[in-house]
Image (spheres, grey):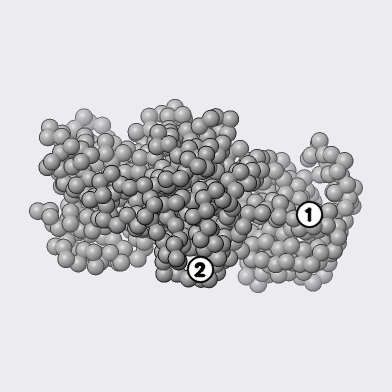
Amino acid sequence: MEQITRNLANDSCGWASSFPIFQGATIDEVIGSLSAYISDASPEQFRAWKGYIKPLQNECAGFLTTQPRAVSYGAVLEYLMPESSKRVDAVLLISGAVLVVELKGDGNYQPDYIEQAADYARRLYWYHSLCGEEQVRVHSLLVSYGELLPDKVREFHTLTHLSRLRDAVARFDRPNESEPIPVDKFIAPEVCQPAPSLVQAARQFFANNALPRIKRIDDVTRGAVNRVVAEIHDAHKQKRRKLVLVSGVPGAGKTFVGLQIAHESFLDDLAEVNAAGAKPTSPAVFLSGNGPLVDVLQYELKRAGGDGRVFVRGVKEFVERYSKKKSGPPPHHVLIFDEAQRAWDEHKVRTKHKDASAVSEPETFVRFAEKVPGWSVVMGLIGTGQEIHSGEEGGVGLWAEAVNKSSLEWEVVAPETFRSVFAGTKAKFSGYEELHLAKSVRFHFAAGLSDWAAGIVGDTVPASTLAKLAQSLIHEGYQIRITRSLDRARQFLWEKYRHTPDARFGLLASSRDKNLDLTGVDASRFLRTGPWYAEPENSPSSCRRLQGAITEFSAQGLELDHTLVVWGNDFLKKAGEWDASQAKQYQKKSAVKNPLQLRRNAYRVLLTRGREGMILCLPAIISELDETYAFLVEAGCEVLG
């Protein structure tokens, strides 16, 4: 590795060099470089630099004496966080790790300091293209250079004194496993590569005519994408009809798989000249039954200057168009159905479309596909445990019924776990493990969040086991907090994100909560989800105002950086078991097979919408939530102090 012989500071930092160059520089050189970078540095800032720079140099020098490979390690000071106006005091680049070091001179480890250091580490993990992979982990170190305090070590963050920093560095050092990130590459402007949310990805697609290659999401979804592309090409070659299903846990990237298939170049070789003589950009169309997702994507795209319907279309609109007797077949050979587990059954379709002869949505799509000349593929994206509407409880079984009723020969390609669902049908079944996405990519630090949420809403996992899951999530940097005060929760989030105007956080509530009015939360069903998700804080419609709440219906398939979930009386712990007897009643009880299961699914959705964390608020004014609150605390939620 090329040796660094000078300070490489650029627009992203005030100092950047190897350990040897840093420890050999005079304090005036270092402070001169930092003050040139931060021209408006306050007297307090200068005092801080004078208080910790020399000891920090000494710790690096000491580490050089014990680890010969440390000559290639890097020290970056006053590093500007990607996608932020905040700077971290220091970043140390060592073998196998990036250490985010926040230095405090007042001699305490107060929670706000811990939160600040953890937020910096989270931001690097998600927005820096060289950080956070398996071989380069990100850790936060809160370091006191005042009073000598005892060490506290957790997997994600460490609290230590500056005089013991070299020992903390040694705990994370992996000299025999991987090389450090080179300083010049770490501070290069092109490495600030945000991993966008679904909405941001849509905006980039509109601008660049291609979905961005999203860090970490590609690694999780590549196998599924490759398998689906291969199956589509095989259907084209063999002139066959196929149903391809991709399943996954919440946040695993199912929607991204569908968007990539529909809008990237995988299927360009299959595009055909249509009747009008125009060659379509893709033989696939992406359809979503998730109304809020469609609203948000189309709202964003219209703000960017385009027609949102070109990018994504609603299932209901599509069905209405191609169900008409005079309509021809869809112009697409590949029909991609997002949230396919939520497809409507026959009764729901007949009610909504006012058509007594209508069939279920899966059967409708199979019929559409059969009209397409030559070959066709129906691709369904299946989320587990997310059926929350009446009429959605048939799940994957409706797709099995649809292919079984067909007069044509269908082949089903799906995760192996679906084999039993299609066992009684006449369709040929092929199972592939890569078609199930088991790892969440929505949550920056919470690969096990879906398991914890599923355990919370179930009645079979002991609270002690859930507490261990929660503790593991917290150690990884995810935040699960609980409070009885809505005002306290609001103040926490406003303070946490006041320097990051692009961060999205908002109120979530259950649609079946009878007591929501008592809390002063407005969960109107007329709330416009597009502006709620997208508008800045100065807009009355913005989620950041923490006034209007969305329900499980508007939250499904979308996410925020942080959520504030107001727990309702529709899902309570009573004598140790979940009870939904106080939920608002469904208008047509006969259409609902298992109201309690729908409540479980609704709260599972509410508990899995935050990428960085969540706060659960069980308002103290509602005493019947006492047992539920006690259970959630026992299950690992940290009380918001």
Q: Quadrant of the N terminus?
A: bottom right
Q: Is residue 169 above or below residue 230?
A: below
Q: Amino acid at mark 2?
A: Ala
Q: Counting other residues with Cα less than 10 Å from the Cα at mark 2, is it few (<14), some (14-19), or many (20 or more)?
A: some
Q: Amino acid at mark 1?
A: Leu
Residue at x-position 13% and y-position 41%: 356
For the residue pair 402 and 330, the one nearer the viewer reads as: 402
Residue that badge 2 annotates: 463
- Classify residue 99 as left or right of residue 409: right
Tell me where residue 247 sits by quadrant.
Answer: bottom left
Which of the labelled discs sits on residue 461, or is there none? none
How much space separates mark 1 and mark 2, taking CA atoms?
37 Å
Residue at x-position 53% and y-position 71%: 464
Residue that badge 1 annotates: 103
Asked if residue 194 shows in the view, the reply is no
Q: Is residue 504 above or below residue 302?
A: below
The tag earlier along the polypeptide, 1 or 2, is: 1
Q: Quadrant of the C terminus?
A: bottom right
